[in-house]
Amino acid sequence: MFRLSEGFVIETRDLRKLYGPHLALDDVDIQIPRGAVGILGPNGAGKSTFFKCLLGLITTTSGEGSVLGFNIKTQGDMIRSRIGYMPEYDSLDPDLNAIDQVRYAGELLGMNPAAAMQRAHEVLEYVGLKDQRYRKIESFSTGMKQATKLACAIVHDPEILICDEPTNGLDQRSRDFMLKTLRRTVDEGGGTVLMSSHVMDDVQEVCDRVVLIHKGNIVVNRPISDLADQIEKEVEAVIWGGASKMEEALQADGLKVRRMGRVMRVTLQDENTIDRVISIAAKAEVQIRELREYEPDLEDIFLLIMDKLGARVKGASELMTSKHTGGGRNA
């Protein structure tokens, strides 16, 4: 029997899923530790299939896996009872007030009515809705609805919380509160959050680690702090008076350039690269207004990784499916 290695909440070995001739998961080997993890991947990458296999909702073609010590092939019901899911889509009943909605979610998960009601009061306070718990959901703002969905997902105190686009449609204040609440779930509750989002700033704020799925393979499974070490270092130059001329001159000199308007990001080839950039600008008769070593953010890191994989994407929104994790079978 496949057993979970110490220190991990999720582990798979040679996990494969075929839908007829279509290979959705390609011998996936992964170990995910406790904490906050961003689950990323373009549409069709295999995220939905991966989650369904972990939850025992579909049978795997081959391979093994374990979640919280339970076998994904034979103990899916035990796994699902320990998972909370906050979907992207609207899953609330507008005619219910918040306390009854959350209580009902608890009862659906097997809690007795009294325990579900008590827990509903607790989690609604936790997500900032203590004073609005008796209001009908139809009167709620988008932020309040998202908070209610989160309360429903954690009413049974799950060990793993799966959140799909948790800040979708939120204003800045509600977004900040949602992200802080998710982070508290990890820091204070000791739980695990698996968060899917196309907003890389959100992932970077909540998560310690990211997993990137591409064409049924796990191509990245690392702490965010280690990701910058996986890409080439760059110097960033802000050009004035001839950006196109500067780009052409840099390329003609054999330098690798990424251009964003007047901003040129040049791959550092060696210790002479900066001097070469300055010299090229002088010869091209253009001004360098700013010149500094570029510190990539998470979105830029992933664009560079996807570029290396041959997936030409222009922004983080193209990295992600707009469907929830219960979407199409090859999503």
Image: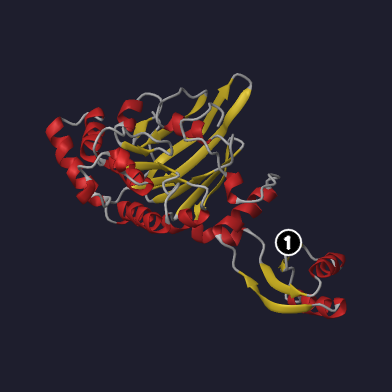
Residue farthest to the left, as pictured = 114
| Image position of 294 with respect to 207: above or below | below
- In which quadrant is the C terminus drawn? top right
**Is label 1 in a helix, a strand or a loop?**
strand
Q: Where is residue 103 drawn, in percent x and y?
A: 21, 35
Task: Give the residue at mark 1.
Answer: 258
Left or right: 192 as drawn, with respect to 311: left
- In which quadrant is the N terminus drawn? top left
- Residue at 57% x, 56% y: name it: 299
| Image position of 182 with respect to 239: above or below | above
- Residue at 70% x, 73% y: name it: 238
Report which quarter residue 311 is drawn in. top right
User: Does residue 270 appear in the picture of this structure?
Assistant: yes
| Nearer to us in this view, 154 or 22 | 154
Left or right: 9 as drawn, with respect to 314: left
User: Does residue 267 appear in the picture of this structure?
Assistant: no
Instruction: Estimate how packed mark 1 is, as few (under 14), some (14 to 19) or many (20 or more) residues with alpha carbons within 10 Å.
Output: few
- Residue at 34% x, 42% y: name it: 160
Residue farthest to the front, as pictured = 139
Q: Where is residue 58 drawn, in percent x and y?
A: 45, 23
- Residue at 54% x, 36% y: name it: 28
| Nearer to us in this view, 240 or 54 | 240
| Image position of 246 with respect to 279: above or below | above
